[in-house]
Amino acid sequence: MFLRISFLLVALVLLSSCAMPPDSPRFQPSGSLPRHDQPSFDEYVRDTHAWIADNRAFIGDDRHREIALNAPFERRPDTPEKRGILFVHGLGSSPWYFTDMANAMAEDGWLVRSILLPGHGSRPADLMLPAHEDWEDAVAHHTQLLANEVDELWLGGFSTGGNLVTAQALKDDRVEGLLLFSPGFYPDSQYLFLAPAISYFWDWLDIDDEDNIATYQSLPSRGAALYYRSVSAVQKNLEAEHFDKPVLMTMSQHDSVLDPAATLDAFQTRFPNPKSRFVWYGDTPPHLDDPRITALTSYLPERRISNFSHMNVLFAPENPYYGEAGSYTMLENGQEDLTPPDDPDALWFSAWGQQDPEKYHARLTWNPYFDELLDDIREVTGD
């Protein structure tokens, strides 16, 4: 999603001047946040659609598509819903990140909802507007709305969203289990604690071209500070208690944002339910004796995949935007000394920052094991 936060924080400490954004609406806050406390989910979706239409700094000509890829949504099953799950996206991403999973789970009989965290869906500068409490309140409110409609309530989250739903579940006995994808419990940075202080002096950590309609490419320092708040909250909660109910957790060994080993250790020590599962994409971890952990190789040369990224786990290969033949390719991937090949069939795919002088690596944005992941979800949830 973004360049590594640790690198950016260190760079700002060493630099004497801040990053200056271009004169563009994308780098100027819109001045308001959408409501998230409507009494019904339908009203919330309708109001948020309208707010995005009024406040988004659009990237392309297809405004309806951009709104759809950033707005909250719901998928209802054909049969009367008894089980429901609320999904929460990560820093800079969007509710649409769960579209493939939502479609599959609705077919399995789930009522699925995916919400928009305040500060998202419009322009990167809007991450300067929310407080961490706004994110917590949005998750709590929509957990309550979904609990009113279903007999069995689950929460799911990606990255920062994984922190928020875990913190909610640890204080909410109604939550029956968690689905956590690259949860952001443990950042790969010893400097993240600096983010709140830096946000008082510098507005931006990273400024990039905004050409991705589903993800912010640029990061205000306030956004990093909000992530730090979510890390502090969930780590404090996990240190105080276990989560004894079922959880599915995924992690790439080569995640460029997080500490995969610390996450694996947390799963083994803080999530003891025997039904829980951890899917590790990479080499088999050493001294692995927990039968709840599955290791799947992330080196798939027949598909030109060197390893898995922070984000790719959520997307089916058939996804029309991020999929194997999707319309968007993340070419900017931390390889400043290399030039992307003219032939797209010569691209390889990986986590951010993969270095190989003979191969250009774009970001991997789809999961070759997506169907297997759905089976893991069914096993953990008892489908």
Image (spheres, rainbow, N blue to C red):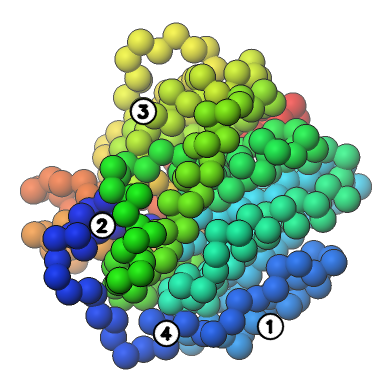
Q: Give me the residue at 28% from left, 48% from top.
A: 191
Q: Give me the residue at 34% from left, 50% from top.
A: 192
Question: Is 229 on the left or on the right of 357, as rendered?
Answer: right
Q: CA distance from mark 4 to mark 3?
A: 38 Å
Q: Quadrant of residue 208?
A: bottom left
Looking at marks 4 and 3 on the same chain, the residue that comes earlier in the sequence is marked by 4
Q: Around disc 4, counting alpha carbons within 10 Å, would you say few (fewer than 14), some (14 to 19), or many (20 or more)?
A: some
Which of label 3 and label 2 is nearer to you? 2
Which of label 4 and label 2 is nearer to you? 2
Looking at marks 3 and 2 on the same chain, the residue that comes earlier in the sequence is marked by 2
Looking at marks 4 and 1 on the same chain, the residue that comes earlier in the sequence is marked by 4
Give how far across and how far down residue 41 sits, in percent. 80, 64
Disc 2 target residue: 9
Q: CA distance from mark 4 to mark 2?
A: 22 Å
Identify residue type, mark 2.
Leu
Which of label 2 and label 1 is nearer to you? 2
Identify residue type, mark 4.
Gln
Q: Around disc 1, counting alpha carbons within 10 Å, would you say few (fewer than 14), some (14 to 19), or many (20 or more)?
A: few
Number of numbered discs on residues: 4
Identify residue type, mark 1.
Ala
**Contact between labelled residues 2 and 3, with CB atoms less than 8 Å apart:** no
Disc 3 target residue: 261
Q: CA distance from mark 4 to mark 1?
A: 20 Å
Disc 1 target residue: 50
Looking at marks 4 and 2 on the same chain, the residue that comes earlier in the sequence is marked by 2
Disc 4 target residue: 28
Badge 4 element: loop
**Can you name the residue that lies furthest to the bottom here?**
23
Identify residue type, mark 3.
Ala
Work out whether residue 162 or residue 373 is closer to the camera in this orientation and state it: 162
